[in-house]
Each structure stands twice: as C-alpha cells, then as structure tokens.
Image (tube, coloured by chain):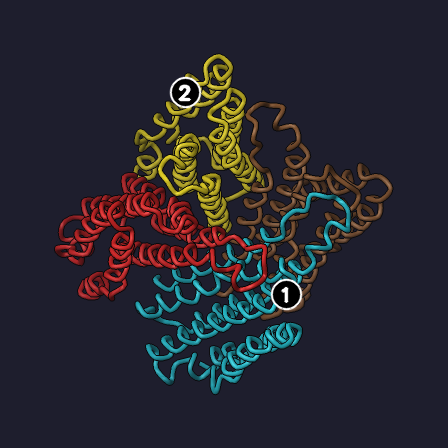
Chain colours: A brown, B yellow, C red, D cyan
Amino acid sequence: MTKGRLEAFTDGVLAIIITIMVLELKVPHGGEFEDLKPLLPVFLSYILSFIYLAIYWNNHHHMMQTVKHVTGGILWANMHLLFWLSLIPFVTGWMGENHFTAASAFLYGIILLGAAIAYFILQFLIIKSHGKDSILAKALGRDIKGKVSPVLYVLGIITSFINVGISGAIYILVAIIWLIPDRRIEKALKNQ
Amino acid sequence: MTKGRLEAFTDGVLAIIITIMVLELKVPHGGEFEDLKPLLPVFLSYILSFIYLAIYWNNHHHMMQTVKHVTGGILWANMHLLFWLSLIPFVTGWMGENHFTAASAFLYGIILLGAAIAYFILQFLIIKSHGKDSILAKALGRDIKGKVSPVLYVLGIITSFINVGISGAIYILVAIIWLIPDRRIEKALKNQ
Amino acid sequence: MTKGRLEAFTDGVLAIIITIMVLELKVPHGGEFEDLKPLLPVFLSYILSFIYLAIYWNNHHHMMQTVKHVTGGILWANMHLLFWLSLIPFVTGWMGENHFTAASAFLYGIILLGAAIAYFILQFLIIKSHGKDSILAKALGRDIKGKVSPVLYVLGIITSFINVGISGAIYILVAIIWLIPDRRIEKALKNQ
Amino acid sequence: MTKGRLEAFTDGVLAIIITIMVLELKVPHGGEFEDLKPLLPVFLSYILSFIYLAIYWNNHHHMMQTVKHVTGGILWANMHLLFWLSLIPFVTGWMGENHFTAASAFLYGIILLGAAIAYFILQFLIIKSHGKDSILAKALGRDIKGKVSPVLYVLGIITSFINVGISGAIYILVAIIWLIPDRRIEKALKNQ
C-alpha cells in the first residue's frame, strides 16, 4: 500500500519533470527552418536530460520492485532524490540557451552528482532496512556502475572549466554506461 | 506489477503532454472577440494534436492489455515513443503561431512519422517477446492502418513544400482513419 | 482494468488542468500589496474554475463507480469531455486578465456548456451500454440538475452582452447547485 | 476504491504543484555564475516550499492509511486543502522574486495558515466519520504539532511587518518541527 503510493507520486513527479522540460523549447516567432537553428543546443540538451530522467525512472522502478516495506527514512530519501531531479529542467534550459558555457556545464554536473548521491542514499536505506541478504543487496553486488558514475560526474565538473566539450562527452558517456542493459535486479528477482 | 507502473508513467506523461499544449494558447491582452482571431490557427492545430494524442493513448491502452510481461527493450521502446510525443506541443505551437508555414507543416509530419515508427518498434518488441501466436499478433493481422499511416505521413511531409493545405489535409485524413472504430484487439481478447 | 486506466488518465488530466490554471496568476514584479490588486479578478475567476473542476472530478468519480465495462464510445466521450475541460484554464485567464468583459463571459459560458453537453453524452453512453436498470440509470432518476445546468449556461451566455454581472452570478449559481450534497449515486450503490 | 482514486488525484495535484514551482526559476539570459545570483532568493524559497509540500504529502499519505470509507465531506475537505496548496507556487515565486518583502512574507504565512486549517478540517471530518476510537483519533492523541503550527504561522504573519527575517525563521522552524520523525500513526496502525 505505502509502496504503491510512493511509486505513484514518484511516477507523477518524474512524468511532469520530463514533460515540463519541453517548455524550455520556446516556440520561435518566425516560421522558417532557420528560426529553429538557435534552438538546436536546447534540443540537444533536452535529449540528454530526457535520457537521464528515463534512466532514473527505469532504475527506480527496478529498485522499488525489491522493496517490501517503506520506512520514514526511505520516504524522505526519495523526496531528496526528486528534489535534485526537479532541478534538471532548469539547468537543461540554462545550458541549452547559453550554448554550453563552462558555468552551465559545471552546474549540470553538480545537479547530476546531487541526484546520484541522493539515489545512493535511497539505495543504502533500502538495503539497511531489508538486510544484507535482501534481493537488492544481492543484485547490486559490488555496484560498479553506481560507484563509477559519481567519479565521472566530478571529472565532468572539473573539466567544464578546461574544455566544455570534454565535460559534455563525459556526461554522455555516463548515460551510455547506464543504457547498456543491466539485468542484475531482474536476475536476482528470478533467483529468489 | 511492472506493467502497471509502465502504464501509470505513460498515462502521466500523455496526460501532461495533452494538457500542456493548451499553454500555447496564450491569453490575449485585449478582451474582445477580435483579439481571439490570431489564436484561431493555434486552436485548430491544438484540436488536431489533441485528437492524435487521444488516439495514441487509446491504442497504447489497448496494446498494453495484451502484454503479459515487460522486458527492458519494451521499457525503452516505450520511452522512445514518449520522446516523440513530447515534441508535439512544441511543433503544434510553432505551426499554429506561424499560420501553417511549409516548414512547420514539414516538421509536424516528421514528429508524427517519428512517433509512428516508435509505436511500430514498441509493437514489434511486444510481439517478439510474446510470440507469433500471442493475442496482439493475431489481433493486428496484416495491420493495414499501421502500414498506411507512415506512407501518408511521408506524403504529407513532401507535399508541405508544394501546398501546405494538401499536407494538412493528409494529416487530418490519418487522424480520421484511426478514429474509425477498430475492434481487432477487443475481439482477439474475447476470442482468447 | 480498462476502467482503472481510464480513471487514472482522467485524474491525471484533471489534476494538471486544475493546477496549471494557477500559472495564469503571473507573479507581479513589485513586492507590495498594491501590486496584487490587478490580480484580484484573475484570482476570483481562478476560484470559480477550481470549484467547477472539483465538481467535475467529483461527479466523474461517482459516475465511474457505477461503470462495469468500458466501450470505445465511452472512451471517446470521455476524451471529448476532457477536451472542453482543458480549455478552462485559457478562458479563466482571459476572463480574469480582462476584468470580465462581455466577450470573455460569453466564451466562459460556451466552454461550460460544451463541457456539460460532453458530460451528458458520456452519461448517456454509459447508461446505454449498461441498461435502463443499471445503477446509474436508477440513480439519476429525472436528473434535474443535469437538465437545469445547460439551460442556466445558455442564460449566462445570453446575459453576458446585457450585463456581465448577471452572467457571472448565473455561473456562480450553477456551481452552488452542484455543491449541494447529492447522494443519488451513493444511495443507488448501497441499495444495489 | 473511492479512497484509491482520491489518493491518486491528490498525488497528481501535489506532484504537479511541487514540480511546477520550478518554473518560477526562470532561466537567465546570461550564461555565467553571476547571472544566477538574482535567482538565489527564488531558489531558497523554492527549497522551503518543496519541503512544506513534501511534508504535506507525507502526512496526507499517513492519514489516508487510516481511512476506511470516504464521505462527500471528506472529498470536499480534501479539495479545499488542495486549493490552498495550489497557491504555494505563486506565493513562493512572489516572495523569491521580490527578495522577501514584508507583504510577500505575510502572504506566504496566510497561505500556510490556510493550508493548515484545511488540513485540520480534513482530519476532523475523517475522525468524525470513523469514530473517536478510530486509528487516526488514537494516533493523534493531543496532536501538539497540529495545534502549535497555526499559532506559529500567525506569529510569522504578524512579525512579517516588524522583521521579515524573524518571520522567515518561524516558517523554517515549523518545517523543522514536522521533519522530526513522528511515528504516531505508524505505531497506531501496528497496535491495531
């Protein structure tokens, strides 16, 4: 019961975040193709953020399947995650509209890092309340992806001041790493 | 379980897309009927896009009723479909605000084509994972509607540069084709 | 199943419509109380529309409790209702921002009338597919409220050109009529 | 059934309110860090309002777990609560954009007070319809938090004209009081 409503609320917030982002694609006044050109960087950052949010929804969804009871700590850790994700439309719009300045790539990395840490805390609290032999604990194993991502975000944040292209490439790389199918939780659920 | 949350997330995103579109109908400063005139093209494109999104929700809803298990591929194919649909408010606003320029009618067709292809991929992956004797596979049969639509979209895209009226008529035609009741899935579910 | 998803989608759309309306209350640049004054008419029309949408949600919710199977016709009648309701934020903002001009009060009535007719069609299709002895048919009885409302809306539309105050009073009256508790469906469900 | 849809609708509205607020963080035109400075007060008020809405969701969620049947009164009391909460994005944006003027801190307190009273009414109607020996009645006990909060809001409203800093500190204090874990309902559900 509790779990169902937590999922429903999270789904609602994620659905709105992912959709609201499109409002940053402001309809141009002119009606020709060249009027779309200034929107290209906004569109590219939109695609990247869309993929990130889809990955978060996907991972959240799998993680919640292993959850059996929801504690107050889990509820708040989930809210904390949603807080960071709610900032993605803003920073996506800022990065796109200013054609990937160093400052905007820096902030984009900070938000992604904040979300990653929030996700880690949520995962930690779920494992803590379900025990080390729980499905999630077994499924994660050494959780290499989860540990490599924050390191890469930090790299992206640092390189944003050297070369914003490298920074962007790193953020794209993390997205690709997570897009590669990862059946740890699915397997663990089957072997239960 | 998995299926339920996929449906809930999709419902959320579609509900937001269909509603956010209305924000492109900017409240005019004047309070007389003549102040509404410039909004007429936006309103007309709003109606068309509303119907398209309603058709997608309707079809998605029927298709999901035949789904018994959700794979990672289905999850991502669904996200891909939502990505294309999320661009509809933008292109609807652009087309309406610029009174149906060739470029905007072209882009409108591209987005519709993208969504149609994404829907086709999703359908393909569901059939693939459920087998050729599955309810969906039987229900679709030769899937004439699904095959004719992309061809018509391509026609609409091409004609947009010749005569934007023909292009618009084609998009309306496709919507009408889908509005005609189609009980293939309902029948197949009954004959199960 | 089908019914559940129809309700979920409707809930989503209604929740967004009711919330998006608040975006018409544009944050004023000044920070004093007098800067809020121009917003007062928008706020008043916001309250009225909020109540209307709450009534629609409430009635829809009760009506759906009597539904046992969902036909294609019901699905589309529901979409038609959502279409009219989706226009409420626009006309609310227009009426408020222009301090209740005759034209905006006229359009407000048109949208309310459209929604009322759409609701009537939805109700008709549900009764048609569930039979004259169905719970809903019995609960509605002569359905005085449902028959009086459209008449009052038409009155409000006509009077908008004579005196916008009378027109507004009529719209408020209809809202009050519906706010008066009405336990027809609840009773019918109990006596089942 | 009824309860489920009430929760779903409330979740939807709350999810939208909490997410729409981020739209008040307008993307600045410049791409440097200094361009973010004017947004800092908006961001701070965003954090405070996010926490308040999360607390409301959390408490609503716990309270609804004790509900067994939903009356018309409960439905409308819930709508009344949503009305006040729907005004939070507006007043958050106003307070942030004008760097915490006395008037905006005053209005912020009024909205919080309105929401608190609406919540109290909802709680009262649930207890009334479920009896004095119901889970919720037992769980609340003397309900010190619920009684202290309105008093503190009134204090915040009054002090807004003396020193806006004190007023803000009081609003933060109330949020902290509610963030402290409170297992009354959870316990009462277990001891059932």
Say which residue label 2 marks: B170
- Specify the farthest residue to the top: B162
Q: In which quarter of the image is the N terminus of chain D?
A: bottom left
Residues at circles 2 and 1 in contact by the CB criterion of under 8 Å: no
Q: Characterize the local packing of mark 2: few (<14), some (14-19) or many (20 or more) Cα atoms within 10 angstroms.
A: many
Chain on which label 1 sits: D
Between marks 2 and 1 in the image, the one whose residue lies nearer the viewer:
1
Total labels drawn = 2
Residue A134 visible somewhere in the drawing:
no
Front-most of C6 and A128? C6
B192 horizontally vs C151: left or right: right
Spatial CA span between label 2 and label 1 = 54 Å
Front-most of A151 and D85? D85
Q: Where is residue C53 in the image (x, y as percent from the top left)?
A: 35, 54
- In the rendered image of this protein, does residue D146 appear above or below residue B111? below
Q: Characterize the local packing of mark 1: few (<14), some (14-19) or many (20 or more) Cα atoms within 10 angstroms.
A: many
Say which residue label 1 marks: D100
